[in-house]
Amino acid sequence: MAETAQVQSQEIWVEPISKVGQYSQWKLMRMRFARNKLAMIGSIGLLVLYIIVALAPFLAPTDYMRQNQDYVYGPPSKLTFRGPDGKLGLRLYTHPVVTQLNPQTYRWDFKPDTTKFEPVVLFAKGDPYTLFGIKSNIHLFGTRNSDVRIYLLGADSLGRDMLARILMGGRISMTVGLLGVALTIVFGTVFGTASGYYGGFIDDMMQRLVELIQAFPTVPLWAALSAALPNISEEFTALDRYFLITLILSLVNWTGLARQLRAKVMAYNRADFTMAALAAGASDARVIFVHMMPNAASHIIVVAALSIPGMILGETSLSFLGLGILPPLVSWGALLRDAQNLQTVMTAPWLMIPGIAVVIAVLLFSFLGDGLRDAVDPYSI
Amino acid sequence: MVSYILRRLGYMAILIVLVAVVGFIIIELPPGSYLEVELTRIRALGGDINQAMIDALKQQYGVDQPLHIRFWKWISGFVRGDFGLSFEYWTPVNQLIWLRLWYTIFTSLLTLVFQWVLAIFIGVYSATHRYSLLDYLITVLQFIGLSMPAFLLALLLMVIVHKTLGWHVSGFNSPEFQDLPWNWAKIVDFAKHVWLPIVVVGANGTAWLSRVMRANLLDVLNMQYVQTARSKGVRENVVIWKHAVRNAIHPLIMVLGASLPAIISGQLIVGVVLNLPTVGPLYFRALMNQDMYLAASILMFLTFALLIGNLLADILLAIVDPRIRLGEG
């Protein structure tokens, strides 16, 4: 079905000749994308990840804000398939944990009481939450006894469940990239197209502005802008801060897209279809929106997708420094703030798991962006 | 060539002024100033700074006056080397940041060299030994290096080194060497500490650069002059290094300037995690405490370093590529 051609020492995939007339440009891109294994891993993985964080309160057995003074820096709960009769079965059990102060190290020891067994049930009743407007208190898994809680990934400095916090933090971290990139597309497209199309003074001014913004080192500029945000109060909630942080992240990012789009639009200015449209009496707006933008659309999507990892990493770094997302909202970077020094990490290494989540999310987005770029560019190998 | 450099220098001067203005405005955006924060804190504790001192400070640095007067007082001190007073540390800014800036720039330069050398070798190996086991391993490492935030890698390496080797890893010198003058032992100790921030910050850039190098070299190895060289009987080593790599490096030099901001940003954040005497921890503290002269001066110096770095990168490109020298520039 797929024919391959030999050119020099490489194989280039060529679309089936018999059907090439029937495929539109978008279908060709989709076919090339689907053929790229890493890109498919990236896109499917991201879909799964987004579904998981959307269902966050349902999937975690506890509320992410519930503190538990008896389980400060507690380790992940031990789950076992061995039932009260000592035989391996199909049911998962967990043990209630007894907290004791160790007189030698002055630290809390968490000993699971292996005489008592608490079965892990599906769709257990737990803390109430609201998901998509539906109030419920059913969680995916949990225990019947609310005194025995399952800490799948351990607990933090206030005894809060890390799994719940990572899932809720995932909501913020994964949407910052999307929102930020949407803003980047808006700013970058408007400025880049206007500057490339009109040229002259507008172009000059935009070029100077872009160079000024790009002269600053990124993280110090982000940090300075974030420090300017007002403190969390009645009028300025943590959610408002989240939106402004996204705005700040995209304020520096749009310059790259604007520059590339300007080059493209300048090339299109001299193209035949532009001259034909203008000669036919099309207005400037029509030429830009109906003729130039669709041609540049694939490029815009690729640049946008490739800048998402940078935004996620930027938000994580800012939150890690304490300049990004502040409580009560939580993001992966803010969670990593707890893991800042050697002592804490040595005693509670599970505090670094949000870092793994960041790496996975950025990896998947990188695969997606690379796949899009290869699918869109017909000459890449 | 000379006119190209002169034009760039002149342009840079204008940009520096603009950067100073914009930087100062951004730092001054939060309402209030450190003076008020400190006064509130002292009054809450029951003490008070001498009123005459407060008045004198207010006059010298124009804290009560409008923005452009404050900016002018700050700028006019540059000629004398006076960058303002840090309110939190109660010392002139230039005393605080001089050594730290040099440390920052030194480690950034080392990171740049490390990044480049490693990326070229990895890229060449990866391109010439395509589809080998090591190539796949390198690809995996590259992806991880691209997606891991620098501070996370710093934490991981800190834990691993501490557990396996038991070295002291934070700061630039072990406690016993802190106050000693520089001798050979101290330099060795410094090397034992500085490799961590270099590796951590360089990981990201190395991953990205080596992928670009690999792609470029693959393109170049398909060119006809490489075929000609091989058919002439030139040794494979010489073909790759003298003919192919030289041409493949050129796009890399073009992106040299773009990798500098990432290095500086990375060094700042890693400096906070590893508690290094670089500009990083100082800058973020100053931002949170609204220590405006300190923060604005650091931001300006970092931007200045970045601009110089970009200029040097462009000069390097002009030396390597005659089209830039002779063309529009």
Image (cartoon, coloured by chain):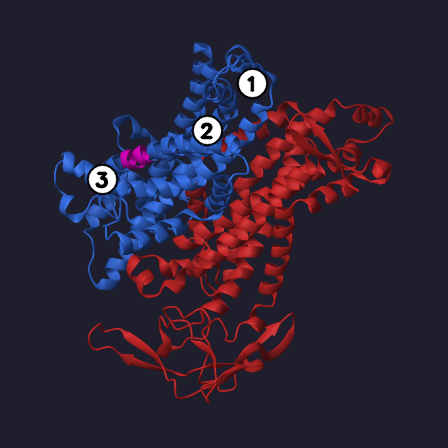
Chain colours: A red, B blue
Residue B104 included in the magenta stretch of the image: yes
C-beta proximity under 8 Å, tags 1 and 3: no
Chain letter belonging to callout 3: B
Please report whichever mark, 2 or 1, sits nearer to the chain's N-terminal start. 1
Q: Which of marks 2 and 1 is in front?
A: 1
Tell me the element at label 1.
Answer: helix
Q: Nearer the viewer, residue B204 or B32?
A: B204
Chain letter belonging to callout 2: B
Residue type of the residue flagged with mark 3: Phe
Q: Give the range drawn in magenta.
A: B101-107
Instruction: Examine the rendering and report whether any part of residue A235 can be seen.
Output: no
Residue wearing tag 3: B190
Tell me the element at label 3.
Answer: helix
Residue at x 41% of width, y 31% of height:
B116
Q: Where is residue A327 in the image (x, y as percent from the top left)?
A: 45, 63
Residue type of the residue flagged with mark 1: Val
